[in-house]
Image (cartoon, rainbow, N blue to C red):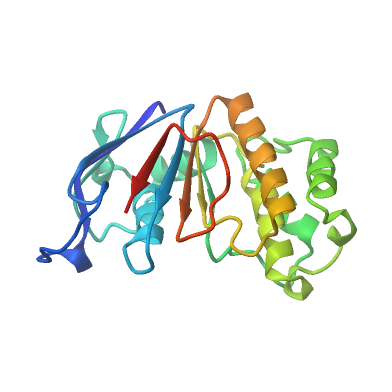
Amino acid sequence: MDKIQLIGTLPCVFEGRSDIASDVWNKTVEFDRDKLYLVEANSGTGKSSLCSFIYGYRNDYKGQILFDGEDVRKYSVKQWTNIRMKHFALLWQELRLFPELTAMENVEIKNKLSGITGYQKEAQIKEWFEMLGVADKMDAKIGRMSFGQQQRVALIRALCQPFDFIFVDEPISHLDDTNSEIMGRILTAEAKRQGAGVIATSIGKHIELNYDKVFRL
């Protein structure tokens, strides 16, 4: 997939409002593969909804979302499954890790569901754990880790699949500057390796990347 387009897209909950000033809602917006984007927003302006709409998790919006010119409302369940396995990666704001499993088990589940069993090599995964300062937590249950530690594990999990675009929703909200910078390096290196686009969101503190375009939601 090379291009995502939003044409007149607006969350249904905002319909009828005349006070919406946005670079995204009710506009024509394009996201190109291999580019870096930042979507800045205030709370309640639909930041997480945007990710959910594009990911196909929700469809309560007006207007159109197109993938390479095709309206996603026509997609079947099978097509969406393929999109999420091979074209889109997502680091959810609320992370959606399994608290009863260890950090490594959470990552391994994704790595085995990527459509290519063992998409990332074990050595690469362990290197990311080391770089992000959570190597000693690989066998610890997620439910016993801090939210910042969980954010780092969630990034590693998100990278364990092929993707054309990766969405990271407030990925550094609980990280210090050092770990934020390391996360940025890991994220951009893997995106570059896959020739993928990055769409990051923020309501304040944002991951420091060399963005090609910044949108104000």
Relative to 191, 214 lies left or right: left
Mark count: 0
Extreme right residue here?
A: 136
* Residue 105 at x, y percent in the picture: 77, 57
Q: Quarter holding the N terminus? A: top left
Residue 147 lies left or right of residue 81; in this view the side is: right
- In the image: residue 41, left or right of residue 94: left
Question: Residue at (68%, 45%) from the top-left corner?
Answer: 181
**Residue 154 image point, x, y percent:** 65, 55
Q: Name which residue lies at 46% across and 45% down.
A: 81
Q: Residue at (61%, 34%) from the top-left corner?
A: 188
x then y, percent, for residue 145: 77, 70
Could you say which quadrant of the image residue 171 lies in? Answer: bottom right
Query: For this view, does 201 lie left or right of residue 59?
Result: right
In the picture, the quarter occupied by the C terminus is bottom left
Between residue 29 and residue 160, name the one nearer to us: 29
Q: Position of residue 31 (x, y in %)?
A: 36, 34
Residue in view at x 49 percent, y 32 percent:
164
Above or below, 62 against 181 in this view is below
Depth check, front residue: 94 or 116: 94
Residue 141 vertical placement versus 63 (above, below)? below
- Front-most of residues 20 and 5: 20
